[in-house]
Amino acid sequence: MSALPEALPHGDLEEVFPDVFFVTGTMLTQLMGAHWHFSRNMTVVREGGELTLINAIRLSDEGLAQLEALGTVKHVVKIGSLHGRDDAFYKQRYGATFWALPGMQHEHGLVADRELVPGGPMPVAGATLFAFEHTKLPEGILHLDREGGIVVACDALQHWVAPDRFFDEASRERMTGMGFFQPANIGPVWHQVNEPKAADFQRLQGLGFQHALCGHGSPLRDTAHRDFSERFQRVFA
């Protein structure tokens, strides 16, 4: 396995719903010929003493101590093709089961232990997978049947209302101009790369949910279904 990326600056784990935790950290990457420095999120779901990490972010030693105080890391879940920088770290450190959609490419020689498919086994009880059917790269959204319905997304759904402290100035300016900072948004770069079709978003509207925890932005509580439905209608009108 190739050398794994170091931990980057991040915030604290916050319990946003009972046994559902959320942390925002940093992403550094090269994309479309430019350097990007922006924020990303990890969602952690606890069942008993076991933890499932979705959109994994490597935490600092202090952050790992906070994580381990919550329970034992048992599952790492990749639902977005453009993420995955830190999945191998958790696989290596904790021996976690790595779940991913069929057809995804993984970093650091990682191979999925379990495939995520609609209607198939899930790492979390009461979870189901929504899989996009008309995108160039595999992408999924996990639906948690709790608190009125929570969707955990990666890049397809974003709720970046404003840039946060994990941005550099160049990325803040570039991404403002690209339309990233809008509530209940479809990820602009994800949209450009994947060329999604309206049919997938029409199916997504059929899910019952109130809240959204996305790979980028802040938690969207209570009005997520309404707000994203309005966005889909505007984009695909």
Image (spheres, rainbow, N blue to C red):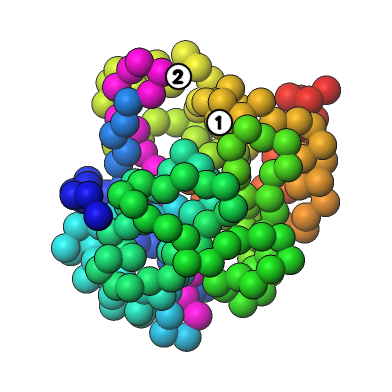
Disc 2 + disc 1, Cβ < 8 Å: no
The residue positioned 74% from the left and 66% from the top of the image is: 119
Decide if residue 103 is on the left or right side of residue 35. right
The quarter of the image holding the C terminus is: top right
Query: Which quadrant of the structure image shows residue 198?
Result: top right
SS assignment at label 1: helix
Q: Can residue 144 be seen in this view?
A: yes
Q: Vertical placement of 105 versus 199: above or below? A: below
* Residue type pointed to by label 1: Trp
Which residue does the image show at 32% across and 38% down from the upper left?
Answer: 27
Along the line of sight, the residue nearer the viewer: 41 or 124: 124
Question: Residue 40 placed where, x, y %?
Answer: 39, 43
Task: Establish if 9 lies above or below 60.
Answer: above
The residues tagged by marks 2 and 1 sit, at their Cα atoms, a distance apart of: 16 Å
The image shows residue 158 at horizontal and vertical percentages of 55, 39
Horizontal side of 126 relative to 81 (left or right) equals right
Residue on which the image places disc 1: 190
Question: Of callouts 2 and 1, which one flags the residue occurring earlier in the amino acid sequence?
Answer: 2
Kind of residue at badge 2: Thr
User: Quadrant of the rendered structure where residue 71 is?
Assistant: bottom left
Residue 111: give x, y in percent of width and height.
Answer: 42, 58
> As displayed, is residue 119 above or below residue 27?
below
> Given this view, does label 2 or label 1 mark the residue nearer the observer?
1
Residue matched to label 2: 176
Residues in magenta, as a range:
31-47
